[in-house]
Amino acid sequence: LLVITVLYTAVGGMVAVMRTDFLQQIVMAIGVVVGLPLLIIYAGGPSNIRTVLADVGPNYLGWHFGFQDLLGFALAFGLTFVAAPYVVTRYYAVPDDRTARQACAVAIFFNVLTATSVAAIGLTMKVLYPQLVVVDAASTVYAAQVLPPLMGALMIAAIIAAIMSTVDSVLLITGSAVSHDIYYR
């Protein structure tokens, strides 16, 4: 996959990265959203999840942060997302301001949908597997042991899409910076 990612990034540049990232974001959103209702049912429903989470760790439930804390988190992550170098370069690639605003709204929608679903998956997996030592393994355990094979494969595809999306964006920015700042001079 790394060779494929490097190849389409090097050959297709910004256009290839934007097109594949859009498709990868759709795969990520579908991968995490489609299996979520099944996971919640598998865990005994929302009320059971709340009850078990209260036993596993009371800090998982309720609001432990004040408004200022939540606003700080939202601003930190929100501004980081819209001002990241690999995102800013894409704003320059769109034909006009209207398209940039629309693209930003679509990206924020998909990111909120994906992040909320991933958080719900994480909490529900904590209910089902409280003894899971490596928390990063929750997504693969979810795909392999909870979801049916086809949906599990879709979840794994979502993970791979997230990796490829990150790698191609970083490669594009790094390549541009190296070619301009080092090679050009």
Image: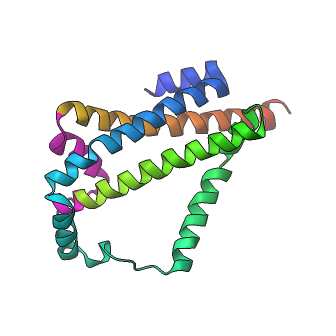
In percent of width and height, residue 150 lies at 22, 30
Q: Is residue 130 left or right of residue 117?
A: left
Q: Which residue appears at 14% of the width and 51% of the height? A: 42
Q: Identify the magenta region.
A: 125-148
Among the 4 quarters of the image, the one containing residue 12: top right
Viewer-nearest residue: 182 or 16: 16
Viewer-nearest residue: 103 or 167: 103
Among the 4 quarters of the image, the one containing residue 107: top right
Q: Is residue 184 left or right of residue 24?
A: right
In percent of width and height, residue 18 lies at 60, 30
Q: Which residue appears at 53% of the width and 78% of the height? A: 67
Q: Is residue 101 left or right of residue 162?
A: right
Residue 108 magenta: no
Which residue of the protein is positioned furthest toward the right in this rendering?
Answer: 185
Q: Main secondary structure of the magenta part?
A: helix
In percent of width and height, residue 112 lies at 48, 52
In percent of width and height, residue 1 lies at 43, 26
- Residue 72, compared with residue 180, is above or below; it is below
Q: Which residue appears at 19% of the width and 62% of the height? A: 127
